[in-house]
Amino acid sequence: MWSETMLGSVGQGGVTRLFRATKKLKTPNVISHITQRVAGKELLFIEDKDYLYMLWVLKEIVRKYSLTLYAFCLMPNHIHLLLSPREQNLYEAMQSLFSRYAMKFNRKYERKGHLFGGPYRQAVCLDDLYLLTASLYIHLNPVRAGLADDPLAFRWSSCRLYTTENPPESFVTPDFILNLLSGDGSENNERYRHLLEHGGKLNIEEVLEQK
């Protein structure tokens, strides 16, 4: 009954958020869903070392700029991040993240020009349901793209941190979102796994893209 009620709430699109396409909001402790895409039809990650380098830089940026990272997914041509800054420095943090990766990528593959297709996109989370929905959307991205049959099988996301009891230490903080599920410990891991399994029945992308 609990999961059906939660899934129903998500499916009805009753989520509140604020899109910022140009002027970015960087108020401390505000949670944002950040997306950034490669320019054109190029790939952002060509081999495993590229994914690993992005994760290394992301970990450094989280530490250096005092960010709280709730979820992420690295797709072949775009990135999803769910995070909040503890200081007024989100724009600077994202600029550093994407410019550092682009410089390394361009040197490695001897390419010129902009790697990313413009400024990152920001959707500010204004309620808990949007936050939960955004995390599901991020973790289900590889399944919708045909890269995996099970989101837990995709290597380059934070999904397994949400479904594993006592996960390894990480620079990702899943507990805040898991605690929205009103359970304890492994119960929340199981509830989140259930939402992932049934989330594919909902067009979460349409819910998030409504403006």
Image (cartoon, grey):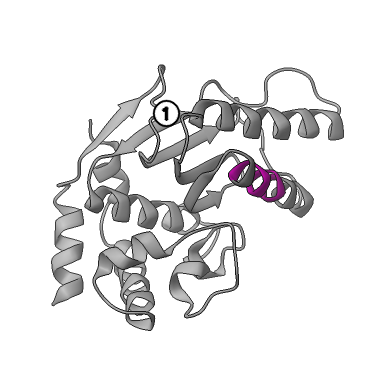
Q: Which residue is mark 1?
A: 26
Query: Relative to residue 107, is residue 2 drawn left or right?
Result: left
Residue 192 in sight from this viewpoint: yes
* Residue 81 x %, y %: 49, 44
The residue located at (31%, 75%) in the rendering is: 191
The residue located at (55%, 58%) in the rendering is: 157
Is 61 colored magenta in this rendering? yes
* Residue 40 x %, y %: 59, 25
* Residue 192 x %, y %: 34, 70
Amino acid type at mark 1: Lys
The image quadrant of residue 139 is bottom left
Query: Relative to residue 82, is residue 19 drawn left or right?
Result: left
The image quadrant of residue 62 is top right
Q: Secondary structure at mark 1?
A: loop
- Label 1: how many residues lie within 10 Å, few (<14), some (14-19) or many (20+)? some
User: Quadrant where the N terminus lies?
Assistant: bottom left
Main SS category, magenta section: helix
Is 178 colored magenta in this rendering? no
Residue 21 drawn above or below residue 9:
above
Residue 1 drawn above or below residue 131:
below
User: Quadrant where the C terminus lies?
Assistant: top left
Query: Relative to residue 2, is residue 105 drawn left or right?
Result: right
Q: In the image, which residues are magenta?
A: 54-62
The residue located at (46%, 59%) in the rendering is: 143
